[in-house]
Image (spheres, rainbow, N blue to C red):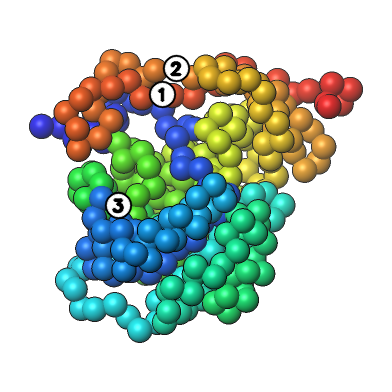
Amino acid sequence: MSTCATVSRDLDEPISGTAATARTWLLLEQPGPWGAKALTSSHLDPALGRALEAAAQDTGVRIALIRRPGRHADFGTPLARQVYAAHTTPGNVWLHSATTTAPERLLDLDFAALGSGDHRTFGATVQGLPHTGDPLALVCTNGKRDRCCALLGRPLAAELAGSGVEGIWEVTHLGGHRFSPTVLVLPHGYAYGRVEAHAVKEVLHGVQEGRIVVEGCRGSSAWERPGQAAELAVRTAAGENAAGALSVVRTDGAAPRWEVTVAHVDGRHWRVIVAQGASLPPRPESCGTSVLGAPARMDVVAVRELAAALVS
């Protein structure tokens, strides 16, 4: 039986505009097995997991668990866990890191401030400091959520780590498992799908040079799905790969059609028409269900650069 990822690939389902949405990511190291809802079904205290979920709700912060690539027999949780916080909105992109022996301290974070891009709460709560190492590549490997993530994600994470690439972590659910293997790259928050090791290396090399690789990109988590598709379309149309060059400044309309305004730091603006369609023929959206569906897709209908007089 074909997996959902195989079917999606064979049907050439578009991946632009399919990234998870989060202005800020909060990542907590948690080795060992993960259940389908990892924050409450792993070796993390489930009461703490529920409290973190509640604290982050509607703040723009998305919490995920991470672990080192490799075998995950239960050798116990390390005394000091790695923690990262990353904000992805252009103009205020940052990645900070810390270690903690008391993950319950994360409940003392001001999640609203963190979601708005204020890193001071992370520094004050867990002594977080700017991350000075390589960018992070988070490979979804949560097989309990969808087996494609384990079948395709874990070998990718192991290959990257085994070849000496720094900043590789396994991560819980990133959404869109039918695009496995899926990878989120921080600090800028661009997600990628159907990636191979050489492509991830190129993406990371690009980040180190201050550029974004568009090929295989699902979008930036800083934007909602229409904005993700619009921003990538402008990057392609304008030949712009500089990280932080573009921002989604306005989205008008509602499903199934939006007008998205994308701005360049140099003052240029584009109006992008994005239409929501259905991916046909019906296909399994997950290996965890036998029900066939028609996943929503973001189709860019038009990209038009605006004259300065039309920018409002």
Disc 2 is placed on an element classified as: strand
* Total number of numbered discs in the rendering: 3
Does residue 188 lie above or below 260 as drawn?
below
Kind of residue sitting beneath label 3 = Lys
Q: CA distance from mark 1 to mark 3?
A: 23 Å
Asked whether the residues under the numbered discs 2 and 1 touch, taking CB atoms below 8 Å apart as contact, a structural biologist would say yes
> Dot 2 corresponds to which residue?
277
Disc 1 is placed on an element classified as: strand
Image coordinates of residue 255 in percent, x first then y, are 53, 19
> Dot 3 corresponds to which residue?
37
> Dot 1 corresponds to which residue?
296
Image coordinates of residue 197 in percent, x first then y, are 35, 53
Q: Earlier in the sequence, mark 2 or mark 1?
A: 2
Q: Residue furthest right?
A: 309
Kind of residue sitting beneath label 2 = Gly
Does residue 71 lie above or below 200 as drawn?
below
Image coordinates of residue 265 in percent, x first then y, are 77, 43
Q: CA distance from mark 3 to mark 2?
A: 29 Å
Q: Looking at the image, can residue 240 be seen?
A: yes
Badge 1 density bin: few <14, some 14–19, many ≥20, Cα 10 Å = some
